[in-house]
Amino acid sequence: MSLVIEGLSKKYKKNNTELEVLRSIDLTVKDGEFVCVLGPSGCGKSTLLNIIAGFEKPSSGKVILDGKEVTSPGPDRAVVFQEHALFPWLKVIDNVEFGMKVSGVPKNVRREKALRYLKMMNLIKFKDAFASELSGGMKQKVSIARALCLDSNILLMDEPFSALDSQTRDILRMETQKMWRNTKKTIVFITHSIEEAVILADRVILMPSSPDSEKKEFRIQLARPRKIDSLDVTYMVSSIMKEFKREVEKVAKADFDERWGMEQDPILCDIDSNMGIGL
Ligand SMILES: Nc1ncnc2c1ncn2[C@@H]1O[C@H](COP(=O)(O)OP(=O)(O)O)[C@@H](O)[C@H]1O
Ligand SMILES: [Mg+2]
């Protein structure tokens, strides 16, 4: 299922002023493509995802799914958020089955499907545990299994691993690569981590820090599975890093001080490369 975003703009009204968050965004995501949307905090990533999901309305422009304009949430788009939103008093399997139960899927069908996706996410051993007994990473894996059960063509993920520790994040990034290979879903994945974007995506969209600038795109044509410490991944991360730093600096200059800069800051700059200055 292809996803087309055309001239999408969004302004929020705050008190009596308008906050322009997105301006004329165009983006086409091919069927089965994994796209990561990367950008500094506050640049409008969640706003974009919420409009695609149908939770928010654009101020102008549109989102088109297989030729039809999106106006509300629908079963063709499943969403995984940063916060897992599981029911702590339900067992893992019942959490995964919950959405299907509500939409009237017969018990044997939903059990079979829940078990299939719990297996895919390496969770089968925990199917009878209560959600409240699981670690943060496990809970996020359950959320992914639950989203997969909806059989949507498109999976929208908004910083799903941002609240986790780095080891757990590494594991979930590997699991996500496997899940995508097995399901062939079209995925739009929001992140502020360059490493995460390079590991996961076919294409990385770097959002500008303000609507005055254009977004940038990077095609990631590296073999999978990708590992965080492999040379080709490191090289790609550093080339996107240069652009990303510029966007982060723009945000910091606007928020703190026009003189703010990573290179000028004695703590943030690379001390080794400045050895000798002032001697
Ligand atoms: N419902 C809302 N009403 C008013 N302003 C909002 C709303 N949602 C987001 N914003 C503002 O829009 C900007 C972009 O937010 P968001 O899309 O959440 O950014 P990101 O996900 O990239 O961190 C922020 O300045 C935020 O305060
Ligand atoms: Mg966000």
Image (spheres, rainbow, N blue to C red):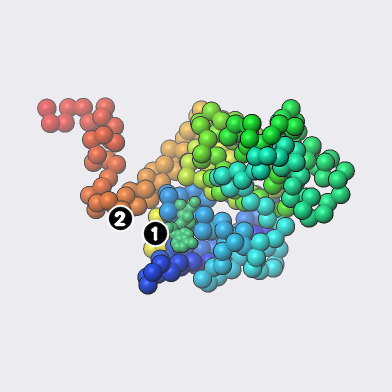
| Left or right position of 43 against 84 | left
Label 1 secondary element = loop
| Left or right position of 273 against 37 | left
- Taking depth in this image into account, of 243 and 252 the one nearest to the observer is 252
- Outermost residue, left side: 279
Label 2 secondary element = helix
Residue 218 at x, y = what percent? Answer: 51, 48
Q: In the rendered image, which quarter contains the N terminus?
A: bottom right
**Distance from mark 2 CB to nearest ligand 1 atom below 8 Å:** no
Residue 123 at x, y = what percent? Answer: 71, 32
Residue 78 at x, y = what percent? Answer: 67, 52
Tag 1: amino acid: Ser
- Which residue position holds label 2? 254
- Taking depth in this image into account, of 262 and 14 the one nearest to the observer is 14
Report which quarter residue 239 is drawn in. top left
Q: Give the mark count.
A: 2
Q: Are marks 2 and 1 in contact (CB under 8 Å)?
A: yes
- Which residue position holds label 1? 210
- Taking depth in this image into account, of 167 and 249 the one nearest to the observer is 167
Q: Is residue 105 above or below residue 118?
A: below
**Picture residue at 53% right of the left edge, 42% below the top:** 197
**Distance from mark 1 CB to nearest ligand 1 atom below 8 Å:** no
- Outermost residue, front side: 89
Residue 236 seen in the figure? no
**Picture residue at 51% right of the left edge, 63% below the top:** 25
Q: In the rendered image, which quarter contains the C terminus?
A: top left
